[in-house]
């Protein structure tokens, strides 16, 4: 009987190696090669048979839209593009304890209460543990089909019999198939199980939601090919020290990407937040230095958040640059522009930057708000408390317009703000000052002059921040 051969597969990128090595040659990660057995009795592939071929159609043909399955959780339906699509596969990732299983169990209960056949399969917890959580979330009375299993074969057989419309797999890293000799959680097992579940979703018309663990870098564990297999990839973000949780769509074939849903963690589970701007600005001080309200845009939703900065003398020889919720490379660029174009020196000073509420900002429109917060802290002068700030800073010091400025201004006006510190002109269908009076900033030195003038006057003078 031929002896099975061994291969070594990288658990980070999936590259196959003939022998073990401490470092993967493809992704340069250390200690990620795991031995997997490969049988030599594999049958050769059959020769291709002649068939009917493919049936091509025109692009202009009509196709029927499939109705979506509403979860009755507004924020989740918003991120998925209006609800779950039958026959689709979704991948939900996030840090341990962030609330993935809680949200999906709540969604499963509401779907079942509305008459949709649902199945929840747990590979990490027993049925008793899931029942206790369902009782705490007040969904224990809903007709959800619950099971605890890690073998893929019995799961697919049971789903063929039950024929659910929505299936939750928690989690994909715990499943294994006897067709492979690799251990559960390895790249081969995760790839094979995800492929079989995705094929089941397309064949049966059920919506399959996979829960995935993340690595220390914040990426979903396993091969990246899993993210290409599924139709949508949703990430749970947020710090467990905060009560806010943010569900962000990184990939969505049936809706917009970078759409976010905001939730608040409570004892009874996750509660949706329909107005995240008011929540992120709750408890904000009126006259605090080093704080600026940024009118941002997350997907199609305008969100207002507070950006906090602190400039302090360095206690040691090398100044620190600490960032939470923003790109550290972008902060270095803004500091360099402030020094080179505005003459503000940060030599021997620590700079700390924080986005309040645990939100992570990715758009460059936050450059002007970050610069305003840093200048406010450096000159120890508060910005106008009734103003919002947004704009992109170039290396020359110019402030460039950003997209959808009218939506940002409308959100700020709805929350009671009176002015906007933004680049000029604002490209909008309406007049620039029809929503909020605009304090036009053409270049970054204009902003610094206004902050210095406020410092010289000793108060927030009306002429200094006149629109």
Image: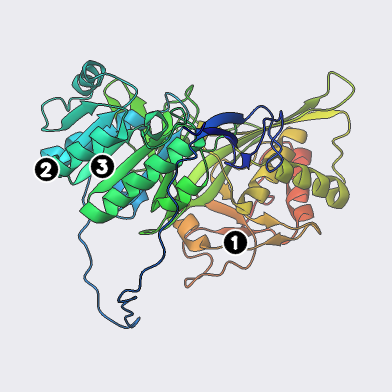
Residue 462 seen in this snapshot = no
Comparing labels 1 and 2, the label whose residue is closer to the camera: 2
Comparing labels 1 and 3, the label whose residue is closer to the camera: 3
Residue labelled with disc 2: 114
Q: Mark 1 or mark 3: name the one nearer the start of the chain.
A: 3
- How many labels were placed on the picture? 3
> Which residue appears at 13% of the width and 44% of the height?
116
Q: Is 239 on the left or on the right of 147, as rendered?
A: right
> Which residue appears at 34% of the width and 45% of the height?
196
Under circle 2, the secondary element is: loop
Query: CB atoms at circles 2 and 3 under 8 Å apart?
Result: no
Q: Pinpoint residue 247: horizontal percent, then vertical percent.
A: 41, 41
Q: Mark 1 or mark 2: name the one nearer the start of the chain.
A: 2
The Cα atoms of the two marked residues, 1 and 2, are separated by 42 Å
Which quadrant would residue 291 be assigned to in this image? top right
The Cα atoms of the two marked residues, 2 and 3, are separated by 12 Å
Q: Is 156 on the left or on the right of 392, as rendered?
A: left
Q: In which quadrant will I find the C terminus? A: bottom right
Comparing labels 2 and 3, the label whose residue is closer to the camera: 2
Residue labelled with disc 1: 402
The colour mode here is: rainbow
Under circle 3, the secondary element is: loop
Viewer-side residue, 411 vs 355: 355
Compared to 450, does 126 lie above or below?
A: above
Residue labelled with disc 3: 73
Query: CB atoms at circles 1 and 3 under 8 Å apart?
Result: no
Q: Mark 2 or mark 3: name the one nearer the start of the chain.
A: 3
Which quadrant would residue 150 be assigned to in this image? top left
Q: Residues within 10 Å of mark 2 (few under 14, many from 20)?
A: some
């Amino acid at each position: 009987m031929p002896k099975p051969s061994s291969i070594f597969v990288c658990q980070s990128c999936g590259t196959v190696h003939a022998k073990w090595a401490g470092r993967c040659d493809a992704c340069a990660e250390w200690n990620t090669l795991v031995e997997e057995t490969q049988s030599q009795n594999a049958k050769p592939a059959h020769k291709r048979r002649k068939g009917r071929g493919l049936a091509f159609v025109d692009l202009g043909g009509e196709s029927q839209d499939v109705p979506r399955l509403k979860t009755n959780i507004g924020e989740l339906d918003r991120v998925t593009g209006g609800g779950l699509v039958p026959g689709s596969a979704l991948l939900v990732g996030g840090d341990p304890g962030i609330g993935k299983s809680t949200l999906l169990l709540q969604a499963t209960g509401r779907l079942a209460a509305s008459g949709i056949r649902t199945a929840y399969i747990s590979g990490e917890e027993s049925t008793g543990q899931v029942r206790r959580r369902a009782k705490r979330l007040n969904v224990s009375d809903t007709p959800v089909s619950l099971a605890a299993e890690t073998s893929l074969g019995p799961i697919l057989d049971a789903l063929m019999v039950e024929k659910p419309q929505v299936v939750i797999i928690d989690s994909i890293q715990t499943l294994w198939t006897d067709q492979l000799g690799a251990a559960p959680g390895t790249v081969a097992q995760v790839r094979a199980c995800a492929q079989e579940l995705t094929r089941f979703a397309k064949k049966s018309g059920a919506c399959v939601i996979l829960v995935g663990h993340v690595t220390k870098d914040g990426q979903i564990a396993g091969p990246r090919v899993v993210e290409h297999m599924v139709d949508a990839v949703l990430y749970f973000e947020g710090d467990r020290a905060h009560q806010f949780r943010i569900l962000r769509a990184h990939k969505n074939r049936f809706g917009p990407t970078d759409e976010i849903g905001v939730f608040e963690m409570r004892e009874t589970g996750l509660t949706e937040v329909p107005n995240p701007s008011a929540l992120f600005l709750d408890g904000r001080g009126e006259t605090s230095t080093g704080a600026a309200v940024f009118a941002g845009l997350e997907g199609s939703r305008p969100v207002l958040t507070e950006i906090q900065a602190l400039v302090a003398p360095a206690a040691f020889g090398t100044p620190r640059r600490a960032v939470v919720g923003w790109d550290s490379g972008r902060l270095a660029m803004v500091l360099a522009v402030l020094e080179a174009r505005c003459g503000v020196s940060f030599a021997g000073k620590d700079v700390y930057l924080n986005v309040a509420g645990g939100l992570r900002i990715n758009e460059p429109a936050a450059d002007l708000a970050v610069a305003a917060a840093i200048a406010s802290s450096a000159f120890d002068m508060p910005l106008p408390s009734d103003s919002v700030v947004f704009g992109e800073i170039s290396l020359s010091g110019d402030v460039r317009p950003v997209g959808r400025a009218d939506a940002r201004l409308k959100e700020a006006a709805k929350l009671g703000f009176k002015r906007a510190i933004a680049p000029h002109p604002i490209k909008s269908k309406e007049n620039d000052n029809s929503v909020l009076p605009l304090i036009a900033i053409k270049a970054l030195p204009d902003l610094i002059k206004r902050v210095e003038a406020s410092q010289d006057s000793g108060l927030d003078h009306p002429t200094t921040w006149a629109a």
